[in-house]
Amino acid sequence: MEPELIADYGCVIGEGPLWHPTEKRVYWTDIATGRLFRYDPATSQHEQFYQGDIVGGFTIQADGALLLFMAKGAIKIWRDGRLTTIVDGIPGEEASRFNDVIADPAGRVFCGTMSSPQHAGRLYRLDTDGALTKVLDGVGTSNGLGFTPDRKQMYYTDTGAREIYLFDYDRASGAITNRRAFARVPNRPGEGGPDGMTVDAEGYVWSARWGGSCLVRYAPDGAEVQRIHFPAQRVSSVIFGGEDYADMYVTTAGGENKAELGPGAGALYRVRSGVKGVAEFPSRVRLS
């Protein structure tokens, strides 16, 4: 389970890896520098294909386009090198940006924002018709999300609170209710905070540790069962990919300061842990 270095673009905030099922490539972002990348495991080729306004997170639309979640609450579709705006911005989010996002089984998108000097972070839900609803407020740092195998519950990470929460989730309405703690990261040196996450085919949670140099695997009851270590302090997110979803792709941050944050800081890694994942849901947000 030694992490395999795939590409090192020195990402300042490498984040949001996502497997594109039709292209069979993994995509990821460097939020701080406004760059997007992709890697094709069939050819071992990788490239930067976008630089512009920052992309805090993204989903893959059912037609293969990318749905980008950006600064100031802007949401755009990237298709064939062109950007089309869905949401210009969100009032009150002028000093913030989107962070982690996930499409739900119905094609909606849960999308979180960072805290700003004006207010704490928030979690929004973007419906398929383009309507945007605030579903959670008072968040430290909105981060990784995932769904239980039965699709009846949703995980949600608040890095600032050092918590991964579990909500009841209603597929018909997109409502989330009954928040409770799933796992809490101890506040001690070297542990870091919970960041991006994904759920594997066995229903276990894989949580990246920003500042903790590792991925942590949690059982469905919240017990820690495994750690995989990386040569980078800021392990930021993880996703399953590959033909049979047996490969984990892991992003890291801190590429501007490898001397202090590790020689692998800012790189994309692949891990073959012997555990398989499942395909992420596509977003199905329609242009107005």
Image (tube, helix red, strand yellow):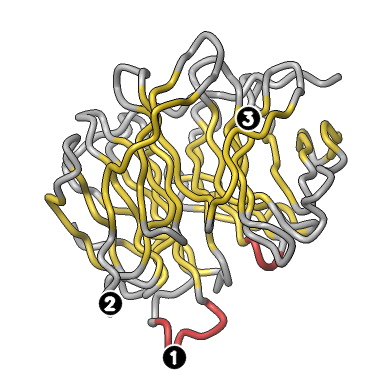
- In the image: residue 32, left or right of residue 106: right
> Quadrant location of residue 63?
top right
Three-letter amino acid code of the residue under disc 1: Ala
Q: Residues within 10 Å of mark 1 (few under 14, many from 20)?
A: few
Q: Position of residue 46 (x, y in %)?
A: 55, 55
Q: Quadrant of the N terminus?
A: bottom left
State the CA–CA distance, disc 3 to disc 1: 39 Å
In the rendered image of this protein, does residue 98 appear above or below residue 79? below
Report crowding for label 2: few under 14, some 14 to 19, many 20 or more residues within 10 A (C-alpha). few
* Earlier-in-chain disc, 2 versus 3: 3
Dot 1 or dot 2: first in sequence order is 2
Q: Is residue 165 left or right of residue 225?
A: right
Q: Is residue 16 above or below residue 133?
A: below
Q: Secondary structure at mark 2?
A: loop
Can you give x and y, in whole percent of width and height, for residue 245 in the image? 32, 33
Which residue position is annotated with label 2?
Answer: 190
Q: Which residue in the structure is indicated by mark 3?
A: 125
- Contact, CB < 8 Å: mark 1 with mark 2? no
Which amino acid type is shown beneath numbered disc 2?
Gly
Q: Which residue is mark 1?
A: 259
Marks 1 and 2, how far apart in space? 17 Å
Give SS at disc 3.
strand
Residue at x-position 77% and y-position 51%: 93
> Residue at left 53%, top 20%?
175
Q: Residue at x 81, y 42 (%)?
A: 90
Badge 1 element: helix
* Front in this rendered view, residue 95 or 70: 95
